[in-house]
Amino acid sequence: MPLVRNPILPGFNPDPSVVRVGADYYVATSTFEWFPGVQIHHSRDLANWTLACRPLTRASQLDMRGEPDSCGVWAPCLTHDGDRFWLVYTDVKRKDGSFKDAHNYIVTSPAVEGPWSDPVYVNSSGFDPSLFHDVDTGKSTLSTCSGTTAADRVSSRAS
């Protein structure tokens, strides 16, 4: 087994979300106020990673005009339902106070390299979203965090 360097992605790559599709691994990371939004890296061995894409490349997918430092894209979640990639992300407009001004969106693509769809607005009731696809029922569940502390502020919604 090859020696794995730590961190596996050098530089600024916070809030990693990892998904396996066949023999391929993908990790999506936060980009905050940087555009294009979200970086997705690819690996076959979990040791060697290359940049696969930056899916949020259009203003229609991510409009961060007027957002202060450290806002923008927080903790994206990359999933695959067997047919397509799903990326759910939060665009944080303001982070002052106990409640954030945070809007959650989903984009999809048949291939990780794109093209990625225009966003579908999900809600503004939390941040750091996670998406789960239940292959047995065909339903997906979205979970978000809506507070500043503790797991008791996590909410879920199935569709």
Image (spheres, grey):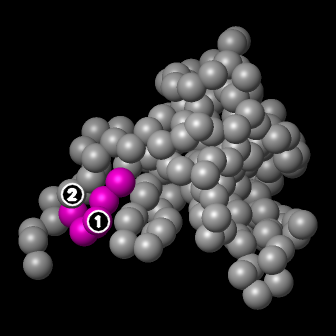
Residue 148 at x, y percent in the picture: 71, 52
Residue type at mark 1 is Arg
Residue 28 at x, y percent in the picture: 48, 50
Q: Are marks 1 and 2 in contact (CB under 8 Å)?
A: yes
Q: Quadrant of the N terminus?
A: bottom left
Residue type at mark 2 is Asn
Residue 83 is left or right of residue 2, and the answer is right
Residue 12 at x, y percent in the picture: 35, 38
Residue 92 at x, y percent in the picture: 70, 33
Mark 2 lies on a secondary structure that is loop
Give the distance between the C-alpha atoms of the residues marked 1 and 2, in whole angstroms.
8 Å
Q: Quadrant of the C terminus?
A: bottom right
Q: Magenta region, mostly helix, strand or loop?
A: loop
Does the magenta-highlighted stretch encompass residue 134?
no
At 47% from the left edge and 63% from the top edge, which residue is drawn?
A: 18
Residue 112 is left or right of residue 45, and the answer is right
At 55% from the left edge and 40% from the top edge, which residue is drawn?
A: 114
At 28% from the left edge and 39% from the top edge, which residue is drawn?
A: 11
Q: Is residue 6 visible?
A: no
* Range of magenta residues: 42-47
Q: Which residue is mark 1?
A: 44
Circle 1 Cα neighbour tier, 10 Å, few/some/many (<14 / 14–19 / ≥20): few
Q: Which residue is mark 2?
A: 48
Circle 2 Cα neighbour tier, 10 Å, few/some/many (<14 / 14–19 / ≥20): some
